[in-house]
Image (cartoon, rainbow, N blue to C red):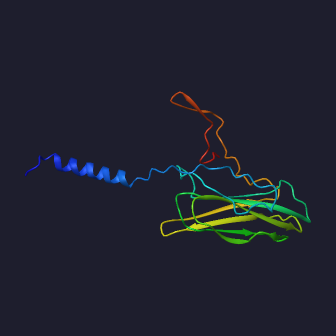
């Protein structure tokens, strides 16, 4: 039996589409829940909240280190690190806390391998501040698999403001493009 010239490619396309449709997982991602830090370090340090699938322009791994706005010497300080892993990876995440001179860990693990999977985890630490240092406490999270690797850092600055880049030099005259004002352009090569 001979098929018309158009039948074979059309049939192949239909079979491919059916096969791809059968492979698609129609399970909706679990809703995320906001991770508010517990009131004390004795609260459950291993809380896991499911997060939605990776969207555009999101990092596969993030870490945020939080603590009080003001710290004085001789004080015990509670810090918490929020680690979020996205992208469907089942790779393990390592979390480490790097302390500057004058600060020592009282409670919590300085290095830990976190459970794998898409989750937002919160870890609590208590540090004793002998003297307020001029450098930061850093939380570092890393993960890798055969296909990718990711590294995230966050710093607790003991109430110091976050460092900022200097504002670039701009031209005095505003720029119009297509009749629309786009503002004062940045000088790429400052004029003498």
Q: Nearer the viewer, residue 162 or 16?
A: 16
In the image, residue 38 lies at what x, y percent?
77, 55
In the image, residue 64 lies at what x, y percent?
70, 57
Q: Which of 146 and 124 is in front in this view?
A: 124
The extreme right residue here reads: 74
- Left or right for 176, reference 168: left
**Looking at the image, how many numbered discs can be counted on the residues?**
0
Residue 176 sits above or below residue 1 on the image? above
Residue 120 sits in quarter: bottom right
In the image, residue 44 lies at what x, y percent?
74, 61
Residue at image point 53% right, 62% down: 89
Q: Which of 123 and 27 is in front in this view?
A: 27
Residue 143 sits above or below residue 6 on the image? below
Residue at image point 81% right, 55% down: 39
- Left or right for 64, reference 70: left
- Left or right for 163, reference 13: right
Residue at image point 48% right, 70% down: 146
In the image, residue 8 lies at what x, y percent?
17, 50
Residue at image point 70% right, 72% down: 111
Residue 101 sits above or below residue 7 on the image? below
The extreme top residue here reads: 179
The extreme left residue here reads: 1
Residue 174 sits above or below residue 161 on the image? above
């Amino acid at each position: 039996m001979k098929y018309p010239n158009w039948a074979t490619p059309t049939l192949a396309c239909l079979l491919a589409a059916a096969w791809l449709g059968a492979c698609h997982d129609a399970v909706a991602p679990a809703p995320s829940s906001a991770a508010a830090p517990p009131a004390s370090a004795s609260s459950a340090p291993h809380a896991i909240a499911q997060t939605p699938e990776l969207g555009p322009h999101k990092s596969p791994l993030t870490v945020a280190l939080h603590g009080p706005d003001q710290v004085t010497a001789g004080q015990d300080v509670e810090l918490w690190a929020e680690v979020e892993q996205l992208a469907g990876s089942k790779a393990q995440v390592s979390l480490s806390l790097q302390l500057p001179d004058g600060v020592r860990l009282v409670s919590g693990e300085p290095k830990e391998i976190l459970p794998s999977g898409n989750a937002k985890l919160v870890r609590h630490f208590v540090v004793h501040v002998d003297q307020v240092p001029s450098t930061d406490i850093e939380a570092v999270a890393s993960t890798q698999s055969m296909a990718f690797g990711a590294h995230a850092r966050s710093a607790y600055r003991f109430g110091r403001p976050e460092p900022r880049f200097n504002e670039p030099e701009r031209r005095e005259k505003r720029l119009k493009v297509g009749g629309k004002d786009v503002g004062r352009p940045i000088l790429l090569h400052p004029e003498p």
